[in-house]
Image (tube, rainbow, N blue to C red):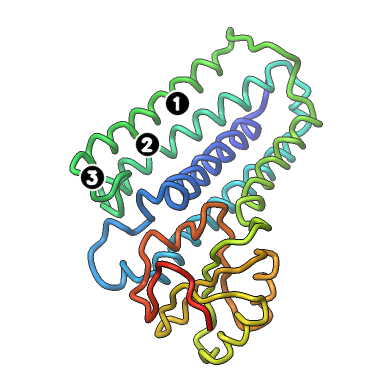
Amino acid sequence: MPSRTLRGAGFLIGVALAGFLDGILLHQVLQWHSLLSGLDGVAYQDLRFRMLADGLFHAVMYGVGLIGLGMLFMARRDLSVEGSGRTVIAAVFVGFGCWHLLDAVLNHWILGLHHIREGSPNWLVWDLAFFALGLALVAAGLWVGRPNQRLPGPPIGTGRAFCLAVLTTGTGIAAATPLTSGSNVTVVFSRTVPPAEVISAMAAIDGQLVWAAAEANIWTFAVPDRRAAWQLYGRGAVLVSGSMFGMGCFSSTPPDGIYPRSGPTSL
């Protein structure tokens, strides 16, 4: 019989995958909300602060995922036991669903940190749909995990467990990898880097200025090759956007810049 460690590993991996889906899809791709978008106050609407909050959220999800992978490694001998595949899949479903339930109850309704569709007149409908999805996923996990429920295929095996670990870890790495085709890149420079050095760094990668918030040292460049933007880390940049959807989470709340956002501005 598969051990509790194996079940716990699948549960934590499910929680991590749900958190990544929330952060990548709802925060960055669809830009429906951010972690603290439901809170009032200047500090909570500050772009840097919101980016930091979302980054810390992803870091926590990475930690949860790594713990789950560690537990999966510890329980690797159980992967050859009959029913181990069903156990892992069921636990992942339950963990995935439990994250939706916890997020809806705690973050949406008790703390009010955000709602699924910020600004929507029917925000409660979206929150309830999110909660219902969590219930459905937990129910699916419990159904899959029934002792008399047999899934097709052999036990998960060590090789498949390794592939699952690589897939979970590689998803986050792939999300942070910039495309090579040219487009806008948003860069946060250290506050100690003067604007003249920022302009010099932009010229070094053949970039054009799109907009900027000089007081926060946040700049957006149009670049012919995103790979060249990685050079900015050696010129004082602390964050270079790598979203496959334009500016990603940067565009959810653009700062009041000293340059217009529409159309690149040549130097």
Residue 147: image location, x then y, percent: 58, 12
Give above or below for 199 relative to 44.
Answer: below
Image coordinates of residue 2 in percent, x first then y, are 67, 24
Marks 2/1 in contact by CB < 8 Å: the verdict is: yes
Mark with earlier residue (2, 1): 2
Looking at the picture, which amino acid does disc 2 mark?
Leu
- Give, as a three-letter code, the residue at label 3: Ser
**Dividing the picture into quarters, in which one does residue 123 lie?**
top left
Q: Quadrant of residue 161?
A: top right
Between marks 2 and 3, how big is the CA–CA gap?
Answer: 21 Å
Identified at 69% across, 70% down, the residue is: 228
Q: Amino acid at mark 1?
A: Val
For the N terminus, which image quadrant? top right
Tag 3 residue: 120
**Which residue position holds label 2?**
101
Q: Is residue 199 above or below residue 32?
A: below
Query: Taking 236 as reference, is 259 left or right?
Result: left
Q: Is residue 177 visible?
A: no
Q: Secondary structure at mark 3?
A: loop
Q: x and y percent of residue 75 in the render?
A: 72, 35
Which residue is denoted by mark 1 in the rendering?
Answer: 138
Could one spot residue 46 in this view of the protein? yes
